[in-house]
Amino acid sequence: MSKSTQTLTDVVIRFAGDSGDGMQLTGTQFTDTSAIHGNDLATFPDYPAEIRAPAGTLNGVSGFQLHFSSNDILTPGDSPSVLVAMNAAALKTNIGTVKAGAMVIVNTDKFGKRDLELAEYTSNPLEDGTLDDYQLVKVPLSSLSKGSVEETGLKTKEADRCKNFFALGMCYWLYSRDMTHTKEWIVNKFKPPYSTANLKALDAGWSFADTLEILPNNYEIPPAKLTPGVYRNITGNHALALGFVTAGHLSGLQLFQGAYPITPASDVLHFLSKYKAHNVLTFQAEDEIAAISASIGAAFGGALALTTSSGPGIALKGEAIGLATITELPLVIVDIQRGGPSTGLPTKTEQSDLNIAVFGRHGESPIPVIAAGTPSDCFNVAVEAAKIAVEFRMPVMVLTDGYLANGSEPWKLPDIGTLPSIEPNFEKARTDGSKFLPYKRDPETLARPWAIPGTPGLDHRIGGLEKEDETGNVSYDPSNHEYMSHIRQEKVNKIQAVIDDLEVFGHSDGLLIVTWGSPYGAVRSAVTEELQAGSKIGHLHLRWINPLPANLESILREARQVVTAELNLGQLKRYLQGEYAIEMNCIGKIQGQPFHIEELRAHFAPFLKS
Amino acid sequence: MTEPIKLTKKDFMSDQTIRWCPGCGDYAILAQVQTVFAEIGRPTHEFAVISGIGCSSRFPYYMNTYGFHTIHGRAPAFASGVKLANPDLSVWQITGDGDALSIGGNHLIHALRRNVDMQILLFNNRIYGLTKGQYSPTSEVGKKTKSSPMGSVDHPLEPCALALGSDATFVCRTMDLDVKHLRKMLHQSYEHEGCSFVEIFQECNIFNEGTFDNVRKPKQRKINALYCEHGQPLIFNKGTQGIRVSPQTFTLEVVTLGENGVTEADLLVHDETNLALATLLVRLKGPVAFGVIYRVQRECYERYAHAQVKEAKEKTPNADIATLLYSDSTWVVE
């Protein structure tokens, strides 16, 4: 039998199930397959902080949303066109974001009395009309999957674990995907009989969908017209890791990462600990303070030093960042932001650490801050931050967030020849007995010499006490302290000369939406839609938060109205108002979730009218 | 390391004015460290002296070597980073009882268990000096200080017991005034491959004068200091008293030679590889144990870490940016 195939441009698919159901894996496989197919895509894994909340409960639901398209896209999509719900709880927690008319594939085996109770349903949503407005596809996924792997001899519990591949097989049929990549992956990842069972479940899912009457046709989403080049799919955390390893190569230095496990930053440690062949040393410290302290020690010792964390860890590192500031040592600090304050929402995204990044230390302690806008931009930001840290001899803060960290997109790989050089320019040994001045500065960058212990003739002492200009000796002289405070600020200001000017996307004299970090994609998409509808609107995206780019003020003054869009209560707005005393508004969202395009356009509306 | 070179104590003195109080025990320790560094025979630039915060932590400023005066309690982590990044350096970490045992307790125990090759010199004066006289984690119960006018109610910590509990591979105790013994301990700590823990009894003559009089005053020292030497019987008090195991309680007991038929043959012979003995010796009441109390060999952390990097490099000899980025699943858009 053969069914017809229709062509679509955009699909948003969301896999949702128990934390143990393998939803992240299923989503990742669909993503990789779609990437290889040539679609543009963006993903959004959304999972609970608990590793395995009780099975079947609302708290245990883990989701993975994927937007794939034959067009250029910048977000994982507002609302799924297809929801795959592996149990009642997954349906309950996700159906709210699914619009009428969308397809909902449910595992009917997990809608028994107990399942409904755990999901806090008082009646069965498959029967009570709840889903009347959706294209409901009822599939006994667990039993069909078990049946398909019967001959492999797996125990019931093990056989049940194959159901995500059954569901994946169905989705592959639905969107005419080539299963080769996933099949190869299964063979590499699992040993028989598990590999055999997963392959059987995958094939069975495909065949089942092909014969299902309720699915009269399937779909094809042609490859997107991306800029020619070599691509790979990348998450923000992986891109960060690759960026720092690359910076190690570019500088010729050993990369040293001090880190303490914390969500959502741990993956950077996982990745880097696998790249030892690239001269990477990872140090899993006893706590956040030790992680940055060891990194600063390594910077003193001559390594390219990095410490990675999230909000709670950054709060603990504050004193040590101050030490790196006064000792003017190269260090990159990464804050992969999550919902706060305190433990907050560990697995959810937020942009509420701008204040702590820019201002979060005692004393006058300015440091450069740069923020990534997309998962692949994390690579560029890592290289750029490392270059500034090394060449200006100072700590640099990199901001990303949970959404960028775990989300992915196709990444056009850089031409190696276009990557910048990073010059450590170590101070050379002295044998002539001349006095070494550890705080004598390069007139251009104000960088002080990087004199590595072990180098003859450069013996010197540094520390947290105020330094005398040039000699670096301890000094309590009032005017010296004021001078050094100004110098440390001036060093940050100097970076303005090497960072790119900003460009407004769209109109610069109408409503100007200003973003930093991860809202880039959603805002750029929403502004594009507004421009197509004829609105007088523009989008300005900041990568450098400190120092602010030189042409920012004139851009802000040209706009009729400035509105920031950020996942906090207005931190960028207050910061810019403080700098420029320009009236602004803020579209703030603080729900642990990224912006949706439609939601942004609704927020723009009153500003466009005024 | 190259051929030993001839340097003197003076070569290790920096040009900075020393700002400790007159009479402070730190002067004696500084002089001995400078002397020992010269005796070691390595050039000044091969030493890195790392400290935290406190009176003793000003130490790096007075040493003509590479030095880093860091933040309170965290020096073991800084020193670990320095050693990892630059493993050929001789790394010395200077700390005090507040810095190492109170705010920095966590970093101390982890540096010790990892066995990063460096020397941790803990100047124990049982008081906070730089903040002008509050009780410290080693102050005795009942101690009256500015923050404990009615006497401290904090139970004190035994630094060497903490080090042993952290699986330190080298634990020794010495004191500021016994300069010959101090130098010997510094040399032995340097020669030990691994993290050496050196507790140095040191007097703060301003806020805690007399705290170690029972062993610090030469006369008292002859009576109460038990110098432990590997392979030698545990004898003190001018050879008149010794230590043996009480068969009833498995604890150490002080015995007098010649009394109740006790001879030297009844005494314990010091075995610095015996953890059980070390654990008892560091808590000995009455006589105070000095010397290398515990010493065993265990591979250093930084060697393990660098060996893994080396192994990975050998497995992937052509690891460059191209192989890094253009790997995993890539596809070409024409």
Image (tube, coloured by chain):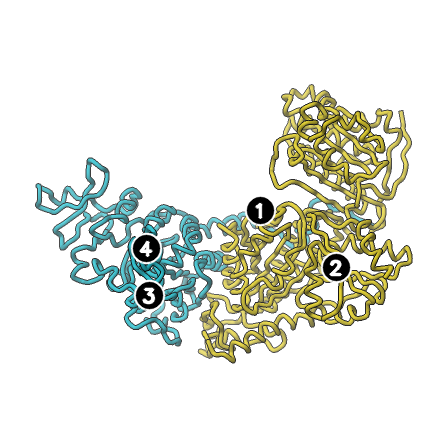
Q: Quadrant of residue A353?
A: bottom right
The residues bearing labels 3 and 1 have C-alpha atoms spaced at a distance of 43 Å
Q: Where is residue A610 shown, x and y percent of the image?
A: 85, 62
The residue type indicated by label 2 comes to Cys
Residue bearing mark 4 = B152
Residue at the (49%, 57%) spot, across then down? B81
Q: Which mark is residue B33?
A: 3
On whether disc 3 and disc 1 are found on a single subunit, the reply is yes
Relative to A331, residue A337 above or below: above
Relative to A113, residue A265 above or below: below
Tell me what hue chain A is rendered in. yellow
The residues bearing labels 3 and 4 have C-alpha atoms spaced at a distance of 33 Å
Q: Which mark is residue B315?
A: 1
Tell me what hue chain B is rendered in. cyan
- Give the crowd class for mark 4: few <14, some 14-19, many >=20 residues within 10 Å: some
Look at discs 2 and 1 and give the one toward the viewer: 2
- Res. A589 in view: yes
The residues bearing labels 2 and 3 have C-alpha atoms spaced at a distance of 60 Å
Q: Are marks 2 and 3 in contact (CB under 8 Å)?
A: no
> Quadrant location of the N terminus of chain A?
top right
The residues bearing labels 4 and 2 have C-alpha atoms spaced at a distance of 54 Å
